[in-house]
Structures are given as C-alpha cells and as structure tokens.
Image (cartoon, rainbow, N blue to C red):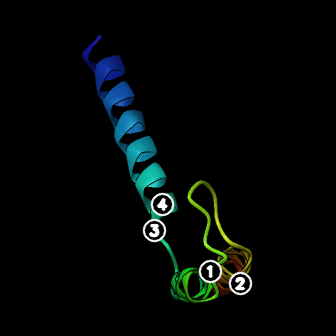
Amino acid sequence: MERLRNGVIIVAVAAAVALMAGCEKGPVQKTGERVDRALDQDRVLGKGPVEKAGKKIDKAVDDVKR
C-alpha cells in the first residue's frame, strides 16, 4: 500500500513540474508580447499575433536542442 502511495505522489509531483515548465515563456515569446503591446495588438484574453509567433519559434528551438 505504501508503495502505491509513493508512486502516486511521484506522478503528481512530476505532473506539477511539467505543468509549471509549460507556463514559462521563452525569450522570443516575451519579445513578441512586448511588440504586440507596442503595436497595440495585445489582447486581454489570449495572445497577440507576434507573441504567438514567438511561442512557435521558442518551441522549435527547444525541439532542436533535444
């Protein structure tokens, strides 16, 4: 029973870490967010077009690093 509990705890911690890592913005996405604000294209809900492009570039860079 203790082994099952430890396994559940490990999975829960791993999921929490993965979710928190997914929330970090890369440098290009942050720059895109600033550009959207400067161009007055930043949205209250969601992301502006340049920030979305920055997120895609950051994801591509991360994929290449792996």
Q: Is residue 19 above or below residue 25?
A: above
Q: Which mark is residue 24?
A: 3
Q: Position of residue 30 (x, y in %)?
A: 51, 82
Specify which label sits upstream in the sequence, 2 or 4.
Answer: 4
Q: Which amino acid type is marked by label 1?
A: Asp
Q: CA distance from mark 4 to mark 3?
A: 4 Å
Q: Is residue 40 above or below residue 13?
A: below
Distance of mark 1 from mark 2, alpha carbons? 22 Å
Quick one: label 1 or label 3, which is nearer the N terminus? Answer: 3
Residue underneath mark 1: 40
**Separation of marks 4 and 1 at Cα, in angstroms:** 24 Å
* CB within 8 Å, label 4 to label 1: no
Residue 57 is marked as: 2
Q: CA distance from mark 2 to mark 4?
A: 15 Å
Q: Residue furthest left?
A: 2
Asked which secondary structure carries label 4, the reply is helix
